[in-house]
Image: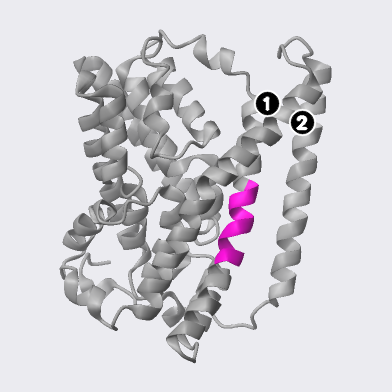
Amino acid sequence: MTDTASARRTSPSATARGGALRPASQRTGRGAVVAVLIGLAVVAALIVVDVVAPTLFQASLPSRVQDGLTLSLSVLFEALPFVVLGVLLSIVVQVWLPAGLIEKVLPTAGWARRAVLSLLGMLIPVCECGNVPFARGLMMRGLAPAEALTFLMAAPIVNPIVILTTHAAFGWDGGILVARLVGGYLIANLIGWIYSRHPSPDGLLTQHFIDTCDRVTHEHGTPVRRSLTQFLVELRAVMPALIIGSALAGAVQVLVPRDALLAIGSNPVFSIVAMIALAITVAICSNVDAFFALSFASTFSSGAIIAFLLVGPLVDIKMIALLRTTFRARTLAGIVGVVILAAFGIGIGVNVLG
């Protein structure tokens, strides 16, 4: 596939596969079943761990269940305002922007478009949770999945709030701020380039999202009515994933003993692996994760801290659940693999140079 504007789709619905749409009630019921099964699996895992290795955790099982619930709610309430803001920005893009405006502003060449989209977070400083509905809106207006992915991977790191908080936490020490910004930008464009070569862009997306694009494309009515309709559509798509992702983040934090991760903090290689695992599980908003990482700076290497700051905003449990509303599981597996390998390589490089 050529890396030019001619390779872009007009919208995900343009090449949507045929077949009847599944009723919304069927999709909602399936989501509820999945949520219940996940909840039961988490409870079963807690009980099994408590029976098999009762000395692994200091706290009792009821205390850990309460801690898991508290952590899940904190992740949910931390992300919720940004998700709503992202939905509102998505509506602005879909309904209120003049047709063709995005195409006129962005460059023609694919690599240049992705390079510009990597910097869009500087103008829209929304955390990673809010970027997902906004990226969905961009695709509904014609951006290719690879271009939306480039924005999604760059915006949680390359934005003014994250730059300010990372500088407040680390200053210029160890090159952590520079490595985070440059690393995030490079990872985003690497992922965008990889998926721009995909022979079937719509094959990266879920059928549900393609169907949603088709409905939005043919939506009639006043802009206000379309905005309200789209607000409900996006919330119904994103909120179940956010709740499940928050629940998983809370459960993993009480299932995985953090002391085991901290015990290998002095090893220059395993410390990076440990911090990557921690970044995926704790699901902290990128606007404040630098202060959380600062507490590990005396134990872990600079490369491990940078790996944490790169992986967390892009592919933590909560973000993966949100991305699943739009991208197929195979696509997400590839994204996670690229992010982890790239962050590990950057972390190793920082440790070697440091």
The colour scheme used here is one colour
Magenta region includes residue 26: no
Position of the N terminus by quadrant: bottom left
Horizontal and vertical percent for residue 282? 53, 32
For the residues bearing labels 1 and 2, Cβ distance under 8 angstroms: yes
Between residues 90 and 193, which one lies in front from this camera angle?
A: 90
The amino acid on which the numbered mark 1 sits, given as a three-letter code, is Leu
Give the structural element (helix, strand or loop) at label 2.
helix
Q: Is residue 305 above or below residue 10?
A: above
Q: Please say whether residue 243 is one of the residues in the magenta stretch.
A: yes
Prevailing secondary structure of the magenta residues = helix
Q: Quadrant of residue 5?
A: bottom left
Q: What residue type is disc 2 on?
A: Ala
- Image height of 100 relative to 253, above or below: below
Where residue 255 is drawn, which disc sits there?
A: 1
Q: Residue at x 19, y 17 (%)?
A: 353
Magenta segment, which residues? 235-244
Mark 2 surroundings: few (<14), some (14-19) or many (≥20) residues within 10 A: some
Closest to the observer, 177 or 26: 177
Residue located 16% across and 60% down the image: 112
Provide the residue designation for mark 2: 45
